[in-house]
Image (cartoon, grey):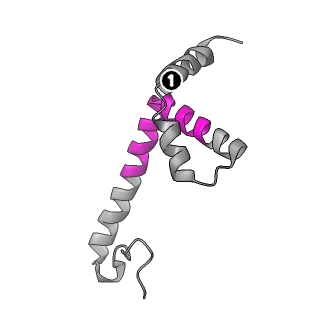
Amino acid sequence: MAAPAGGSRGPDLEFLSPEQLEQLRKFKIQTRIANEKYLRTHREVELLLRGFFRKMFLKRPDNILEFAADYFTDPKLPNKIRMQLIKDKKPA
């Protein structure tokens, strides 16, 4: 099997024992649960990504890396996110 473009094939699961496979399965589940809890308590992550994707799809830049760098280093971005969090907390 050829290695993907990133250079790593990933884990060789066929070399793990049944116990190791079970440990890996449990670890993956625990990691997903922990990640979900983190994202639910940090709404700003969703706002950052949603805003980024929205602007990206509207502008459709040719150089996505440069666009992403500009978006995430915008000095106004933290305030924009704070304002959105405040706006979203207000009752409609």
Image coordinates for residue 92, horizontal then vertical, percent: 72, 12
Locate residue 66 relative to residue 37 in the image: left or right: right
Q: Is residue 24 left or right of residue 51?
A: left
Residue range corresponding to the magenta coloring: 30-52
Q: Quick check: 30 above or below 89?
A: below
Q: Nearer the viewer, residue 33 or 55?
A: 55
Mark 1, residue position: 76
Q: Secondary structure at mark 1?
A: loop
Q: Relative to 54, is 19 above or below? A: below
Q: Does the segment drawn in magenta span residue 32?
A: yes
Q: Residue at x 69, y 44 (%)?
A: 59
Q: Image point 56% across, 32% down: which residue?
A: 47
x%, y% of residue 66? Answer: 51, 48
What secondary structure is the stretch in magenta mostly built from? helix
Residue shown at 65% from the left, 39% from the top = 55
| Label 1 crowd bin: few (<14), some (14–19), many (20+), radius 10 Å | few
